[in-house]
Every structure is written in structure tokens, then in C-alpha cells.
Image (cartoon, rainbow, N blue to C red):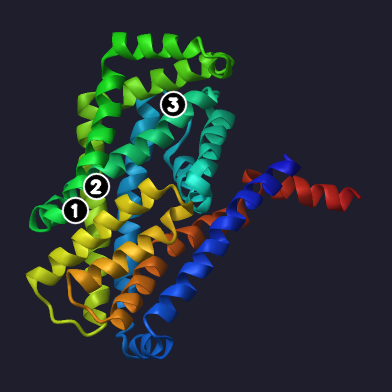
């Protein structure tokens, strides 16, 4: 276990570094002086409201996570323990391609005995249902701005394709048998079948509709939070500004996820700032300031909460074992 924390943090270092670079680049692209001036003039009473709406997003997404656990037969994990594992997974989002989130499946296995591969299906289902939710939220904006249709269509078809294939059992099993013939895949055949069994249960029509519905409401909460941050920067309240906030945040979430960069860092920031400037007509300094604020109120807020859970639960990432080793040494 002592080596596990090394592996986790080694995977997180590029994401943390990229996050720092993204923030610095944003500030300089928007003109450092003007960005700092915008932040000084920002009405900081809006920031706690944005954090509350982010917590609302997390709460509904946790409900979906706990529902998914029940769907694959995990009944031994109480909701309080489930919540702890859910929040502890936030920092794992800044690992490349979010591969660190597989550790959540390990935590589930340690507490329930569920095969890790089947637990991974919960992590994947979370990402896919979130992807569908933000895609649906951004639909109105995509209709208004046809230039985004190609990217929207590719991602939507890809996500729906995964869900549809998972539910056509003969086709999915045929593909699995085909993959088993490949030398590199053969050793993972059992894990792939466990992963598929979990996916098959999680992507049933009723489960998918419920998960996507919860996702749309939860991500809309963050969109409202972004709208409030824009108001705090002095922009005039309007339906157009609200639509821009929801569309920008939703679509940039998809861009960040597709990029496979740690936490979508760099890609999401560029998307948010670029769309605010191109579609909303915001000055670069104002767009950069809004991007900094929303990323602090969402991604980095979540990472901070997760690290807090790690600090009070050192056994999750091997800190307790490392501390015991140092004491014994």
C-alpha cells in the first residue's frame, strides 16, 4: 500500500502542473493587469453562491453514484461511506485521462468484495451519463451556433454507440469473444467480461434515463453558478447571458472530457474563454477572469474537498501505512 500513494501522486503531478500553467497563461493572455483589475472589482458575494450550486451538482451526482452501486448489487456500503468514496475520487480527475479514477473501483472492491473490473463500470457509467447530460444541456446553444455541430455530433454518436452496443447482448458478447483472440487482450478476458456485466446493468434504459436526468439537473446547477459569477463581474442580467453561461460551461465540459487531458485542463479553459469572447463578445480580460473564477469554483473546489477527505482518511491512499512505517523505522 505504501507504494500506492507514490503512484497516485506521480499521476497527479502532470495535472497539477498543467493546472498551474493554464491559470498563468489565462492571466497573461487576458492581460495580467486587466485580469487582476477585473478580479478586484468582482462582487465576491456571488462566489459562495457559486460554491453552493457546485455542491448541489456534487450532491445529485453522488445520488447517481450510490444508485449505480445498488444497480450492480453493492448493498453492503452505507450511503455515508459511499459519499466518502465519491468525494475522495475528485482529486483523481486530474490524472491523465482520469485513469486514476479506477482507484474508486479498488475502494469499492475493498469494502464490498465486488470485482474491480465491475466497479470500473460504475466509473465509466458516471462519465458517460455526465457526458450525455451536458451534451443535452448544450443542445440549444449548438442549434444557435451551427459551427459546433460536427464536434457535438461525433461525441453524441460515440456515447450513444457505447450504450446501444452494451444493451445488444449478443453483439457485445461477440465483440468480447473477438477481442479475446488478441494476444494482449486475452489475459484481461475475465476482467472485460466483469466490466461488461456491470455496464449491461447500468445502461438499462430506465437506469440511463434516471442518471442522465439527474445529470442534467446537477450540471444545470453549475451553469447557474457560472451565470452568477458573470453577474459578479458586472455583466447585465439577461436570458441571453444565462443561456451563454449554461452552453459555454456544458460544451467546455465535453471538450475537456474528450481531450483526455488531466481534468480537461487547458482544453476546458481555452474553450470557456474562447466561447465567452467569440459568442458573448466579452473582452479577453473579462473572459479570462470568468474562466478563472468558474474553474476555481468547480474543478479546484472539488479537488480541495477530495484532498480534505484524504487528509482525514489516510488509509485510502496509503498515508496511514507510510506514517506507520516511519514510526516503526
Q: Is residue 83 left or right of residue 60?
A: right
Point out which mark residue 148 bears.
Answer: 1
The quadrant in which residue 129 appears is top left
| Element assignment for label 1 | helix
Contact? badges 1 and 2 (CB < 8 Å): yes
Label 1 neighbour load within 10 Å: few <14, some 14-19, many 20+? some
Measuring from the top left, give residue 22's x and y in whole percent: 46, 68
Residue drawn at x 59%, y 31% as measured from the top left = 110
Contact? badges 3 and 2 (CB < 8 Å): no
Could you tell which of marks 3 and 1 lies nearer the N-terminus? 3
Query: From the viewer's perspective, is residue 198 above or below residue 215?
Result: above
Query: From the viewer's perspective, is residue 187 above or below residue 64?
Result: above
Q: Which residue is mark 2?
A: 151
Rounded to the nearest whole Å, what is the CA distance between mark 1 and mark 2? 6 Å
Could you tell which of marks 3 and 2 lies nearer the N-terminus? 3
Residue 45 seen in this snapshot: no
Residue drawn at x 24%, y 76% as measured from the top left = 230
Measuring from the top left, give residue 66's x and y in whole percent: 38, 37
Closer to the camera in the image, 142 or 202: 142
Closer to the camera in the image, 90 or 20: 20
Rounded to the nearest whole Å, what is the CA distance between mark 3 and mark 2? 36 Å
Residue 83 seen in this snapshot: yes
Residue drawn at x 27%, y 41% as measured from the top left = 155
Q: Which residue is mark 3?
A: 74
Closer to the camera in the image, 227 or 14: 14
Amino acid at each position: 500500500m505504501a507504494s500506492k500513494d507514490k503512484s497516485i501522486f506521480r499521476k497527479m503531478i502532470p495535472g497539477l502542473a498543467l493546472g498551474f500553467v493554464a491559470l498563468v497563461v489565462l492571466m497573461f493572455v487576458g492581460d495580467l493587469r486587466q485580469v487582476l483589475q477585473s478580479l478586484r472589482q468582482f462582487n465576491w458575494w456571488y462566489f459562495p453562491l457559486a460554491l453552493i450550486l457546485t455542491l448541489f451538482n456534487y450532491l445529485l451526482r453522488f445520488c447517481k453514484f450510490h444508485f449505480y452501486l445498488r444497480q450492480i448489487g453493492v448493498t453492503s456500503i452505507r450511503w455515508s461511506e459511499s459519499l466518502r468514496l465519491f468525494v475522495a475520487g475528485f482529486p483523481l480527475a486530474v490524472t491523465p485521462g482520469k485513469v486514476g479514477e479506477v482507484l474508486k473501483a479498488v475502494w469499492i472492491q475493498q469494502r464490498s468484495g465486488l470485482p474491480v473490473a465491475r466497479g470500473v463500470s460504475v466509473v465509466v457509467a458516471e462519465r458517460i451519463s455526465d457526458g450525455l447530460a451536458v451534451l443535452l444541456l448544450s443542445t440549444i446553444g449548438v442549434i444557435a451556433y451551427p459551427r459546433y455541430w460536427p464536434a457535438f455530433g461525433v461525441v453524441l454518436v460515440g456515447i450513444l454507440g457505447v450504450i446501444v452496443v452494451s444493451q445488444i447482448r449478443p453483439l457485445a458478447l461477440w465483440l468480447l469473444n473477438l477481442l479475446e483472440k488478441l494476444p494482449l487482450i486475452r489475459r484481461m478476458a475475465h476482467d472485460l467480461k466483469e466490466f461488461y456485466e456491470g455496464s449491461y446493468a447500468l445502461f438499462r434504459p430506465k437506469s440511463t434515463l434516471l442518471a442522465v436526468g439527474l445529470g442534467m439537473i446537477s450540471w444545470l446547477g453549475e451553469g447557474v453558478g457560472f451565470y452568477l459569477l458573470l453577474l459578479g463581474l458586472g455583466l447585465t442580467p439577461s436570458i441571453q447571458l444565462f443561456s451563454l453561461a449554461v452552453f459555454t460551461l456544458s460544451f467546455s465540459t465535453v471538450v475537456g472530457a474528450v481531450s483526455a487531458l488531466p481534468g480537461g485542463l487547458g482544453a476546458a479553459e481555452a474553450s470557456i474563454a474562447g466561447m465567452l469572447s467569440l459568442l458573448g463578445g466579452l473582452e479577453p480580460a473579462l473572459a479570462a477572469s470568468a474562466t478563472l473564477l468558474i474553474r476555481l469554483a468547480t474543478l479546484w473546489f472539488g479537488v480541495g474537498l477530495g484532498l480534505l477527505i484524504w487528509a482525514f482518511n489516510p488509509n485510502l491512499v496509503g498515508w496511514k501505512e507510510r506514517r506507520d512505517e516511519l514510526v516503526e523505522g
